[in-house]
Image (cartoon, rainbow, N blue to C red):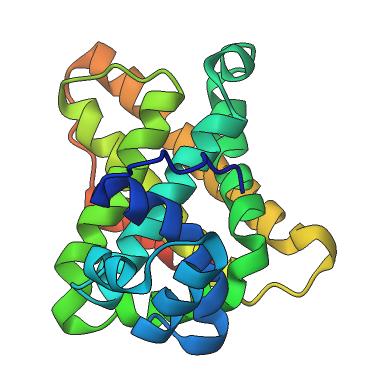
Amino acid sequence: MHAQPLPADPTLDEIRAALAPAIARNAAFDGWSPAAVAAAATEIGVDPDVAQLAYKDGAMAMIDGWIDSIDMEVAHRLPPEKLNAMKIRARITALLATRMEVMAPDREALRRAMAIMAMPQNLARAAKIGWRTADRNWRLAGDTATDFNHYTKRLTLSAVYGSLLVVFVNDESEDFADSRAFLDRRIDNVMQFEKVKAQAKARQEYVPSFSRFIGRLRYPAR
């Protein structure tokens, strides 16, 4: 993962950002715990006490920081000049496929993170993190919608991403071929939904069924 070196006198936010990928590497062995923070601090040369202060709010703060670092890495690997040369479907596919590439070395940490995020007390924050990632991906893809479409696009992409992660953490196929095929099918669903919305908008007589559509994304027919 691309990482910026820490400045001579880093802020706590800069330390938090620098630690996040290293914590994920260690979370595969130590869980999302103070032990992972301590190991990450040693790895990147940060004072252990300062590192613990940076992530004093526990596992969800560590996971949030890691996912934020993934968002930044995806933006680094897919700058506007690359994305702008693609059609919208290819942009969204590339963004999610690149996320898998970034997370691939840390799949065990991801598996543990998903279990923590699924705990009842963490669901609200997990949903907020997922929405942030979906919003960032649509913005990277060039979306500027501010109307009803702004929300429907983020809801559908959140559902696609969530279902993709479930496949990805259990995927033992070569080069994650099964996950890539699953992603292609789900992006087909999204593009079909967007087409229907566009046609309906022209008729001004359609209100999409979120529950039915998102249910199909999360629990697709095999």
Q: For residue 161, which quarter of the picture?
A: bottom left
* Residue occupying image coordinates x 45% and y 39%: 72
Query: Outermost residue toward the front?
Result: 8
State left or right for residue 129 relative to residue 89: left
The image shows residue 41 at horizontal and vertical percentages of 45, 68
Query: Outermost residue toward the right?
Result: 174
State left or right for residue 181 relative to residue 100: right
User: Residue 54: in sight, yes or no?
Assistant: yes
Q: 132 and 52: which one is in front?
A: 52
The image shows residue 149 at horizontal and vertical percentages of 24, 27
* Residue occupying image coordinates x 25% and y 19%: 145
Q: Is residue 64 above or below residue 55?
A: above
Q: 13 and 201: which one is in front?
A: 13
Image quadrant holding the C terminus, namely bottom right
User: Residue 159: in sight, yes or no?
Assistant: no
Q: Is residue 136 above or below residue 85?
A: below
Q: 14 and 184: which one is in front?
A: 14
Q: Is residue 103 above or below residue 48?
A: above
The image shows residue 65 at horizontal and vertical percentages of 34, 57
* Residue occupying image coordinates x 36% and y 66%: 63
